[in-house]
Image: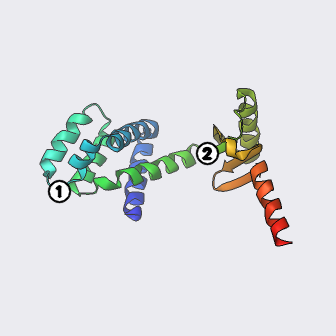
Amino acid sequence: MEEIARVYARSLFEVARSQGKTDIVREQLGQFSDAVSANRDLQVFLFSPYFSTEEKLDGMNRAVSDADPIVTNVLELLVEKHRMPALFRIRREFDSLWEDENKLLPVEITSAIALDDALVAQLSERIGAQTGRKVTLTATVDPDVIGGIVMRVGNNILDASIRTRLESLRKQVSAA
């Protein structure tokens, strides 16, 4: 299923890019995916073998009647090929391609207390300057961190939390 999703996402991305519509397609694909994810009845309708392809196409076309033809075409293809369950993976892969194209770097920062906006902006700018990419920074609060921060940049994690330091000390003491 993962490979199928990659193939669909790459093809969709290439078509959208060739027509200068990557942002529109990303937004509309995300909206449809979120709607399906949030509505159990819609999932049953689109994923169930009890409904015919024609019924699914009719219902789906009513739901996305104002969508860009690129999005409508790929959704119709997913229904016709009985691959609608791959929608969520396709969206995730499309988002990844879009982020790479736009040189976006997702960064997550977790701290024990809320960071002020100026500090978040400063961290975002410094990471962006060092990586040469535009940063999308998400800051969350987790009291279990105790102090310091845990930062995830792409697939790399920098853990400068007091919790981790205390756990490390505990392991050293118990090993001695």
x and y percentages locating residue 81 in the rendered image? 23, 58
x and y percentages locating residue 41 in the rendered image? 24, 43
Q: Quadrant of residue 156?
A: bottom right
Q: Residues within 10 Å of mark 2 (few under 14, many from 20)?
A: some
Q: Quadrant of residue 138?
A: top right
User: Circle 2 is placed at which residue position?
Assistant: 106
Q: Earlier in the sequence, mark 2 or mark 1?
A: 1
In the image: residue 173, left or right of residue 118: right
Q: Determine the secondary structure under disc 2.
A: strand
Q: Amino acid under label 1?
A: Pro
Tell me how many marks there are: 2
Q: Determine the secondary structure under disc 1.
A: loop
Q: Depth check: give the residue in front, 74 or 39.
A: 39
Q: Residues within 10 Å of mark 1 (few under 14, many from 20)?
A: few
Q: Which mark is residue 49?
A: 1
Q: CA distance from mark 2 to mark 1?
A: 38 Å
x and y percentages locating residue 121 in the rendered image? 71, 31
Q: Quadrant of residue 11?
A: bottom left
Q: Which mark is residue 159?
A: none
x and y percentages locating residue 26 in the rendered image? 43, 40
Residue 161 seen in render: no
Q: What residue is shown at x 63% (from left), y 56% (from top)? A: 155
Q: What residue is shown at x 61% (from left), y 45% (from top)? A: 106
Q: What residue is shown at x 83% (from left), y 66% (from top)? A: 172
